[in-house]
Amino acid sequence: MSLAEIKKKIETEAREEGGRILDKARSLVASINEEMNGEIKKIEQGYEDRFRKEQPEMLRRREIVAGLDVKKIELGVKQDAISEALAGALSQLGSLQKDKYLNFVGTLLAEAVETGEEEVLVSESEKFVTSEWIAEYNAKTGKKLTLGKEKRPITGGFILKQGDIETNCSWDMLIRWIRDDIEADVVKRLFSA
């Protein structure tokens, strides 16, 4: 055999061997791709199954959050309505006619007086609760109340003072008590449903 034939034979065998190696490599790549595609499909299917299972829970949670948001908005609207109504009530208390104002103050005094010797503190702008009116009230009820010289930053009503003890019967405090009761009822109704 000549050198050219040997060279040709080696090249042919090398091409055949290279072709077999290349075919084997292609086959291995195809097998790996097929296996990876199967894994990818399993993972995708797993996520789809998991999503299908968790979707109702996710939707339920979203509904809960939306419901809480609605209740929060309702509470805000109701608090605003309460604030407006109580501001109106405070305004009406401040604009009562003299007789009604003093009757109301007299009723509050009858409820709040403990010893009958308290000091009655009023605001700087108080027009109707005067020393004269207190004297008339004392004459009718047998009390010994006095009008205090100290003025308080209240919108109306009074504060009874006996030593270090004070009983706040100002319009502001009355409205605050009413607000606390109303808000507690609103919260109870909102969150019991």
Image: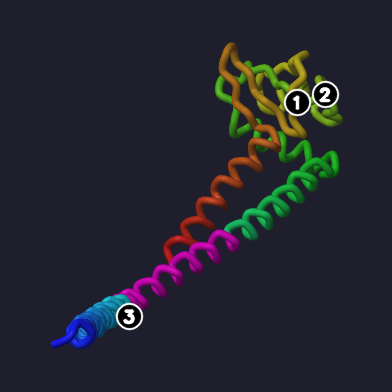
Q: In the image shown, does 147 or 49 lie closer to the viewer?
A: 49
Sooner in the amino-acid sequence: mark 2 or mark 3: 3
Tell me the element at label 2: loop
Relative to 177, does residue 3 appear above or below in the rendering?
below
Quadrant in the rendering for residue 78: bottom right
Task: Kindly give the residue lying farthest to the top in the view shown.
Answer: 163
At label 1, which amino acid type do we have?
A: Pro
Q: Which residue is mark 2?
A: 124
Which residue is depicted at the point 55% across and 66% down?
70
Which numbered marker is on residue 48? 3
Residue 60 among those drawn in magenta:
yes
Q: In the image shown, does 144 or 76 lie closer to the viewer?
A: 76
Quadrant containing the C terminus in the rendered view: bottom left
Quadrant containing the N terminus in the rendered view: bottom left
Question: Residue 122: image x %, image y %?
Answer: 75, 25
Which residue is depicted at the point 75% across and 18% down?
147
The magenta segment:
50-74
Q: In the image shown, does 125 or 26 lie closer to the viewer?
A: 26
Does the image show residue 152?
Answer: yes
Q: Are marks 2 and 3 in contact (CB under 8 Å)?
A: no
| In front: label 2 or label 3 | 3
Which numbered marker is on residue 153? 1
Q: Are marks 2 and 1 in contact (CB under 8 Å)?
A: yes
At label 3, which amino acid type do we have?
A: Glu
Which residue is depicted at the point 72% across and 35% down?
105
Q: Could you tell me how far apart the alpha carbons at marks 2 and 3 are, in whole angstroms?
A: 73 Å
Residue 99 among those drawn in magenta:
no
Q: Could you tell me how far apart the alpha carbons at marks 2 and 1 are, in whole angstroms?
A: 7 Å
At label 2, which amino acid type do we have?
A: Glu
Question: In terms of secondary structure, what is the magenta stretch mainly?
Answer: helix
